[in-house]
Amino acid sequence: MTRTVHVPREASRTSGARERVLAAAMEEFAARGLAGASVRRICARAGANIAAVNYYFGSKQNLYAAVFHRLFEDYGTPLRRLAEGIESEREWRRAVRRWFDLALQWLMDDRPPWRWIARLIVQERAAPSPMCGYLVRHVFEPVRASFAALVRMGLPEEADEGEVRLWVNTTMAQLLLYAQREPPWGEMLQPEDVPAEPWRRRVVDHVASLLMAGLRYRAGGRAASSRRRRARP
């Protein structure tokens, strides 16, 4: 059964109580997931009445969806737009590297809100909540599609969707590994003598170089070819 989720928008984003509830929910859901999160704890942390969740969001599940929308709207929009307007190999290479840079900031930066994003992603992948189908369609798939568009630009026009998926899946798997850095797993992912930020940049360089070694920019790939065909009289 398809779950219909309504994320209320009638309350302004500048509403003080609503924003405090949303911020408190980010931390609570990141720590405990949808099932383990407590509306009472969220409202107490926000300094709001316990009825605030229903008033502003309608339900705990709608609040959970609103958390994902806010995090991915604020921090995911630049990543989703990277494949737009690319007209040269230099722009493509820059966009690929920037995609990895932004994605790994989500997954490797221990500061909020980045750490919250990583924990929410790990929880949904390890133990999908009842909201997972909705989140895949409206949050995760647009992010994946932006990377798939970059991959298509590096594949021959005759490459099928399976080839695109192979490149996307194997590359994104390398990135998602870094979301699971809770002790003791983090010790396996980063050398002790290398600070976090230099290591993140090294990972970006490594993954980007692997991808670009196997692909070759082809003037916009199939997307550009389709545009050219549509433009013909």
Image (cartoon, grey):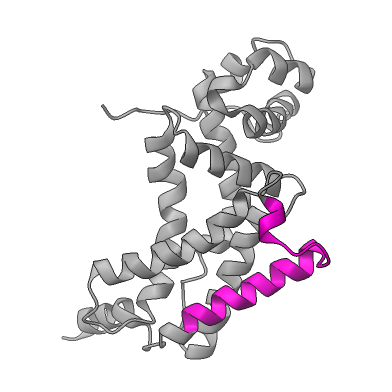
Whether residue 69 is visible, yes or no, is no
Disc tally is 0
Whether residue 82 is visible, yes or no, is yes
Residue 147 in the image, given as x and y percentages of width and height: 45, 66
Q: Residue at x 63, y 27 (%)?
A: 32
Residue 2 to residue 177: above or below: above
Residue 85 in the image, given as x and y percentages of width and height: 46, 77
Q: From the image, which quarter does the C terminus lie in?
A: bottom left
Q: Overall secondary structure of the magenta stretch? A: helix
Q: Residue at x 75, y 28 (%)?
A: 16
User: Residue 206 sits in which quadrant?
Assistant: bottom right
Residue 40 in the image, given as x and y percentages of width and height: 68, 12
User: Residue 187 sits in which quadrant?
Assistant: bottom right
Residue 228 in the image, given as x and y percentages of width and height: 26, 84
Residue 39 shown left or right of residue 132 in the figure: right
Residue 115 shown left or right of residue 88 in the figure: right
Q: Residue at x 62, y 63 (%)?
A: 102
Q: Is residue 208 rendered magenta in the image?
A: yes
> Between residues 120 and 226, which one lies in front from this camera angle?
120
Q: From the image, which quarter does the N terminus lie in?
A: top left
Q: Residue at x 38, y 88 (%)?
A: 219
Point out the stretch of residues depicted in magenta: 186-212
Q: Is residue 110 rendered magenta in the image?
A: no
Residue 48 to residue 24: above or below: above
> Between residues 122 and 1, which one lies in front from this camera angle?
122
Residue 56 shown left or right of residue 224 in the figure: right
